Image: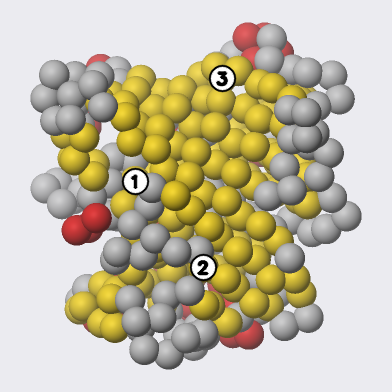
Amino acid sequence: MELDSLRLHAIPGSVEILNGGGGLPMLRLLGRDSTVDVYPHGAHVASFVPKGGRDALFMSGKSYFADGKPIRGGVPLIFPWFGPNAKDASLPAHGFARTQSWSVASTSVAADGSVSARFELKASDATRKLWPHAFSLAFTVTAGKSLSMSLEVRNTGDEPFTFEEALHTYLAVPDVRQVAIDGLKGRTYLDKMAGAARTVQTESPFGIVAETDRVYLDTPDAVHVTLPGHLAVTVAKKGSATTVVWNPWVAKAKAMADFGDDEWPRMLCVETANAASNAVTLAAGATHVMTATVTVG
Ligand code: TA6
């Protein structure tokens, strides 16, 4: 979306249109209680700074900010498949929504001082080449006391389709080796470090002691992350049955060109998703809504 048409959505003192990373246009939502930066590139939330606090989201210093490339950090928006495409490994990992240019539908300020922006993405020749279905997406992000995000998927075709989705939140942490993660006790996860073996989460809270890549199934509850000496973070959700917990640790960090070798201790992904056996089948004309809310303290 060109800068000039974006500027139509500026609201003095509440919504600024800026040149962000790589010169990509960015909206800055100046809420009464927090500031949120979000790019029309991938409808990608890049930062969430509660008033008087620090950025609750991690952003890699080596992230790309370029057409066709996902941003490494913040909240990548994953649709319509999670991870590698099950049928064709040559397709982009985590689908295409995070590398498409979304349009800004509206911006608004609420009575409670929160500021929202709504982005839209509709099926196109480009998306149909990758995924032969008619859909429209709407993503609403709100800078309030919390970071609130809502992803609406509408099936605009005349056949049902099945999709996966995630709000792939990168939390900023002082040291991932010190975090305690709670809210997943007794749940079953696919351990991607063990060939996706189904494993039960017995200990809770639990910590991160090595590369961790777990897809927790049938998990509707909020996840709480405590950080010694810092305010805790909660990732709550609605319409999401899957929770993914990921840290690349040393070797995987080194293997990612858009991630610093020394950055892995400062991030923890707690992702709000519908993936694997929790994939969603949507009837023609139906809409599915998934929301994630990140709260500090
Ligand atoms: O959500 C965890 C995960 O699926 C990991 O397996 C890792 O691949 C991560 O996503 C990042 O994926 P990306 O395609 O953004 O490099």
For marks 3 and 1 on the same chain, the one whose residue lies earlier in the sequence:
3
Q: Relative to residue 114, is residue 263 depicted above or below?
A: below
Q: Look at mark 1 in the image and give the residue it sits on.
A: 165
57 left or right, relative to 103: right
* x 59%, y 14%: residue: 2
* x 34%, y 40%: residue: 79
How many C-alpha atoms fall within 10 Å of the one at disc 2: few (<14), some, or many (≥20)? many
Mark 2 against mark 1, which lies toward the viewer?
A: 2
Q: Relative to residue 235, is residue 108 depicted above or below?
A: above
Q: Look at mark 2 in the image and give the residue it sits on.
A: 223
Whether residue 30 appears in this view of the structure is no
Q: Nearer the viewer, residue 61 or 289?
A: 289
Q: CA distance from mark 2 to mark 1?
A: 18 Å
Question: On the image, which quarter does residue 296 sit in?
Answer: bottom right
Q: Nearer the viewer, residue 82 or 149?
A: 149
* x 63%, y 85%: residue: 178
The amino acid pointed to by label 2 is Val
* x 69%, y 9%: residue: 8
Residue 150 in the image, given as x and y percentages of width and height: 50, 38
What SS does tag 3 mark?
A: strand
How many C-alpha atoms fall within 10 Å of the one at disc 3: few (<14), some, or many (≥20)? many
Residue 175 in the image, given as x and y percentages of width and height: 66, 79
Q: Relative to residue 34, is residue 114 depicted above or below?
A: above
194 left or right, relative to 100: left
| On-image quarter of the N terminus | top right
Q: CA distance from mark 3 to mark 1?
A: 20 Å
Q: Look at mark 3 in the image and give the residue it sits on.
A: 104
